[in-house]
Image: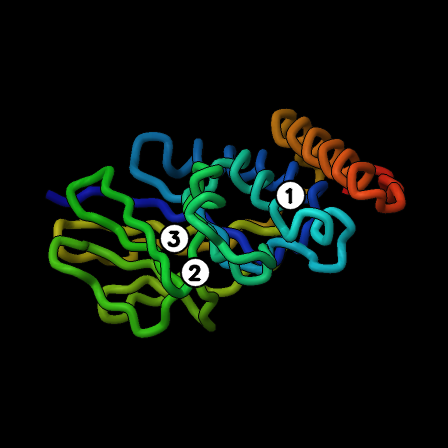
């Protein structure tokens, strides 16, 4: 029996938490429009944090993980997002799957299991209908059972609609949705940003690090 799958994905957030709050709202709009009654996955292809930002330096990138987790992502490519070793304890602290070359994740909410990975040369196991490679490609294609997603700019969401069966998949539609100019930030994400930055400031005080200035807009 075939089912529909919607993949929504982002890339190059670069620690821009103002943008994250707006993208959080845009992701919800797109999910409501294209995936309200079907299986869906929210993914990030990497480069989500800015290693030079003060909150990244203080938290080794965990600040960005908290924001992505609040946005409802299912899995992220941790490359360029977190600087410390990704231990089981770190992974256990988040609902999203933090992928690295030695750690994949499985989505088993439907008749066909979906493997998300950043490992090059990965192969599907028995019973898996689809693999998704969370490393950006030049174009969106299905190759040997793996969906490879085209790179998208920071202020946009990529969308791929697939028809999924127990042991196979086919692309039905693909599109990039630029962030609308006047879309409002998602209040819950904006509140999470305020909380995360407040916690980072307290961490700076405990470490006797000069208190950084909070830029206008909490970025």
Q: Which residue is mark 1?
A: 63
Q: Quadrant of the C terminus?
A: top right
Local SS, label 1: helix
Label placed on residue 17: none
Local SS, label 3: strand
Residue 104 in picture, x, y percent from top left: 34, 56
Label placed on residue 160: 3
11 left or right, relative to 208: left
- Mark 2–mark 3 CB contact (< 8 Å): no
Q: Residue at x 28, y 49 (%)?
A: 106
Q: Residues within 10 Å of mark 3 (few under 14, many from 20)?
A: many
Closest to the observer, 102 or 156? 102
Q: Residue at x 75, y 32 (%)?
A: 198
Q: Quadrant of the N terminus?
A: top left
Q: Residue furthest front?
A: 207
Residue 180 in picture, x, y percent from top left: 64, 42
Label placed on residue 100: 2
């Amino acid at each position: 029996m075939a089912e529909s799958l919607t993949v929504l994905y982002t890339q190059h957030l670069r620690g821009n938490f103002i943008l994250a709050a707006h993208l959080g709202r845009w992701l919800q709009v797109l999910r409501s429009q294209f995936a309200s009654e079907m299986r869906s996955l929210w993914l990030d292809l990497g480069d989500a944090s800015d290693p030079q930002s003060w909150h990244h330096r203080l938290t080794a990138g965990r600040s960005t993980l908290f924001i992505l987790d609040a946005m409802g992502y299912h899995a992220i490519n941790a490359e360029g997002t977190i600087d410390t070793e990704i231990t089981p304890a770190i992974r256990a602290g988040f609902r999203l799957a933090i992928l690295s070359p030695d750690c994949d994740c499985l989505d088993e909410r439907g008749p066909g299991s979906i493997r998300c990975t950043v490992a090059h040369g990965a192969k599907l196991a028995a019973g898996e209908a689809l693999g998704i490679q969370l490393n950006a490609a030049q174009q969106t294609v299905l190759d040997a059972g793996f969906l490879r997603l085209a790179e998208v700019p920071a202020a946009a969401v990529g969308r791929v609609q697939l028809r999924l069966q127990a042991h196979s998949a086919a692309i039905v539609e693909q599109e990039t949705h630029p962030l609308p100019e006047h879309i409002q930030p998602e209040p819950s994400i904006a509140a999470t940003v305020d909380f995360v930055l407040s916690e980072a400031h307290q961490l700076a005080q405990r470490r006797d690090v000069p208190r950084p200035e909070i830029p206008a807009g909490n970025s």
